[in-house]
């Protein structure tokens, strides 16, 4: 069975369709979306419905978690809802929300010795002790080992991940496609006018399609 890991879609449903075609996706293939299915792009509802209807698997990203908090009435006090998040709240159905709420923070795939997560894992920390804020937002590890959400704070976390599981993630559009010995980063900035990228196992091949246009500035 082929497994297609797909980077941050961010509501870019047309590009998702194009990427599935480029990968020669068939109904028997397993598809794993690495989070941030929604927000910023033009058709968040379309992305969620495609995932639901085709039985795709997915992990929750920081934007997915954000809109779920608003939908559930748990947004932080004083926070204003951005237009790109309002569009998600206005277009998803009850069935869409129910599907989103069931998304895990990470997904293990023992048959591939792989794990999907949106942003990353802190090296040296057991999986059960990983903090959700870093599962959703991690980018870098400082020289003293401190994890950070900031790009400039240190080395890409994936470069320090020693396995044994291969971790496939998204989130870091600024660094773009990342290939480390035990970690693969797939956010190639589709919603910002870049590309939507898939990594397919067991063949170990990357597929990308260009964005139709830039929907937001990076």
Image (cartoon, helix red, strand yellow):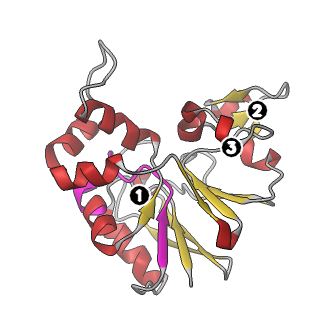
Badge number at residue 182: none
Q: Is residue 215 left or right of residue 107?
A: left
- Give the label on residue 9, or none: 1
Question: N-terminal of the two: label 3 or label 2?
Answer: 3
**Callout 1: SS:** loop
Judged from the image, the secondary structure of the residue bearing numbered disc 3 is: helix
User: Percent from the top left, x then y, of residue 155?
Assistant: 77, 38
| Residue 179 visible in rendering | no
Q: How many marks?
A: 3
What is the crowding at mark 3: few (fewer than 14 residues within 10 Å), some, or many (at least 20)?
A: few
Inspect this view and state whether residue 97 appears.
Answer: yes
* Residue at 32%, 32% in the rendered image: 69
The one nearer the camera, 2 or 185, is: 2
Q: Which residue is drawn at 48% across and 53% down?
A: 59
Q: Name the residue under label 3.
A: 127
User: Which residue is more in the foreground, 92 or 7?
Assistant: 92
> Which residues lie in the magenta part?
30-47
Query: 82 or 53, which lies in front?
Result: 53
Q: In this view, does 166 lie to the left or right of 78?
A: right
- Residue 192 in the image: above or below residue 112: above
The image quadrant of residue 129 is top right
Q: In this view, does 51 lie above or below 183?
A: below
Residue 175: % across, % down: 63, 47
Q: Could you tell me residue 32's position as x and y percent?
A: 49, 65
Q: Is residue 39 magenta?
A: yes
**Dot label at residue 154:** 2
SS state under label 2: loop
Q: Residue furthest top?
A: 78
């Amino acid at each position: 069975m082929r497994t297609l890991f797909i980077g941050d879609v961010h509501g870019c449903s047309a590009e998702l369709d194009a990427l599935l075609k480029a990968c020669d996706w068939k109904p028997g293939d397993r598809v794993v979306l690495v989070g941030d299915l929604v927000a910023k792009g033009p058709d968040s509802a379309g992305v969620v419905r495609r995932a639901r209807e085709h039985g795709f698997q997915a992990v929750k990203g920081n934007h997915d978690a954000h809109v779920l908090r608003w939908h559930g009435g748990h947004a932080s006090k004083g926070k204003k809802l951005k237009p790109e998040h309002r569009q998600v709240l206005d277009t998803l159905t009850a069935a869409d929300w129910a599907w989103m709420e069931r998304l895990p923070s990470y997904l293990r795939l023992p048959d591939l010795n792989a794990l999907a997560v949106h942003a990353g894992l802190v090296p040296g920390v057991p999986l059960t002790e990983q903090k959700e804020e870093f599962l959703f937002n991690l980018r870098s590890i400082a020289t003293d080992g401190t994890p950070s959400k900031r790009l400039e704070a240190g080395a890409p976390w994936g470069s320090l991940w020693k396995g044994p599981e291969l971790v496939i993630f998204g989130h870091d559009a600024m660094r773009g496609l990342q290939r480390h010995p035990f970690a693969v980063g797939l956010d190639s900035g589709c919603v910002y006018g870049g590309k939507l990228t898939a990594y397919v196992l067991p063949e170990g091949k990357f597929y990308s399609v260009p964005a139709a246009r830039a929907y937001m500035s990076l």
